[in-house]
Each structure stands twice: as C-alpha cells, then as structure tokens.
Image (cartoon, rainbow, N blue to C red):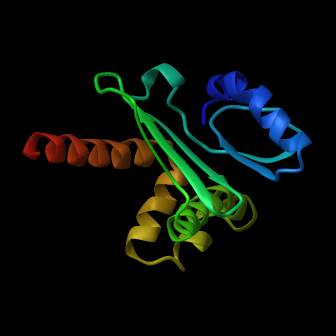
Amino acid sequence: MYAQEFERLRPAFEAAAARGVRVGLATIGSVEFPNARVVELPVTETFSEVATSTLLLVADRNEILLGELGPTAQARASWTRNRHLAAIVEGHVRRTLLIPLLNQRLGVDDVLEVMPGDERELSEALLDGEKLSRLLEKVEDSSHRQQREE
C-alpha cells in the first residue's frame, strides 16, 4: 500500500487498532503508525506510475477482502469468509512483511538461495523494484489476455 493510500485509510486502521486488532502493513513510502507492524517495501515507482493498485486485507484469519483498481478497467473486489483462502492470503501477506526484514538481516543472496522457483522470483521482485515492475507487467499482460479470451 502506498503511503498516500494509507493516509486515506488511517482512521479505519486506527479504529481497528483501538478495538485490539493486530495490524500489519506493507507500505511503499514511509508511514508512521505506532499501533502496527509496518514494513516499508523497497519499491521505487511512485503512486502515479503504477498501473494497478491492489488491496489484500485479512481479518481474524477467517475473512478476506481482495481488491484491485486499474487505470482502464473498472475496480474489482472479492470478499469471502473461506478460512482456507484466508490462510493462503495471510501467508502471502506475512511473507511480504517478512522478506524485507530477512533481507535487512541476512542480505539478498542469503535469503534467495534457499528459495525454490516461483517463491524465489516473487521474493526477488519484493526486494528489487525493477524486478517487481517486470513481474507485475507479466501478471497484468496475462490478466488482459485472459479477459480478451473471455
């Protein structure tokens, strides 16, 4: 989540933290929020340069909201209380928070050498803004191709 997006959602996160919700945020840009575990991702693209914004929200390890907003497509979102899908999304969010911390402590090469295939590609992208951009372009191209086929 970009810092600009966080500021729009700050009141909701503050209310959740006040209710005792554990909040974890992966941000692009600096965010001061003492009531959460905040990890700043090493992404160099600015908010206006990114083609698609994505929101992954996990509540109570039981409920998820996934949303996306692109420049040309209508916003889309999915919500479910499927605990199995919630576990998968939560695992992804936790890795997104963990990988930059591991990189800070171990260095990129030590973290990546123990990861297989797709995990390594995703992790490299999270640690390198240019690789993340290329990975997101591949995902977007695949999504557009799939939409045309439908």
Residue 132 vertical placement versus 3 (above, below): below
Q: Quadrant of residue 61?
A: bottom right
Residues 109 and 52: in front is 52
Q: Relative to 84, is 10 on the left or the right?
A: right
Q: Name the residue at 81% across, 41% down.
A: 16
Q: Name the residue at 46% across, 69% down.
A: 119
Q: Position of residue 122 (x, y in %)?
A: 45, 60
- For the N terminus, the image quarter is top right
Residue 52 vertical placement versus 17 (above, below): above
Q: Position of residue 75 (x, y in %)?
A: 39, 29
Q: Relative to 19, is 75 on the left or the right?
A: left
- For the C terminus, the image quarter is top left
Q: Quadrant of residue 102?
A: bottom right
Q: Position of residue 66 (x, y in %)?
A: 49, 46
Residues 132 and 56: in front is 56
Q: Position of residue 146 (x, y in %)?
A: 17, 48
Q: Relative to 119, is 97 on the left or the right?
A: right
Q: Name the residue at 41% across, 48% down.
A: 131
Residues 111 and 135: in front is 135
Residues 21 and 35: in front is 21
Residue at the extreme front = 81
Q: Name the residue at 67% across, 28% down.
A: 3
Residue at the extreme left = 149
Q: Count the numbered circles shown.
A: 0
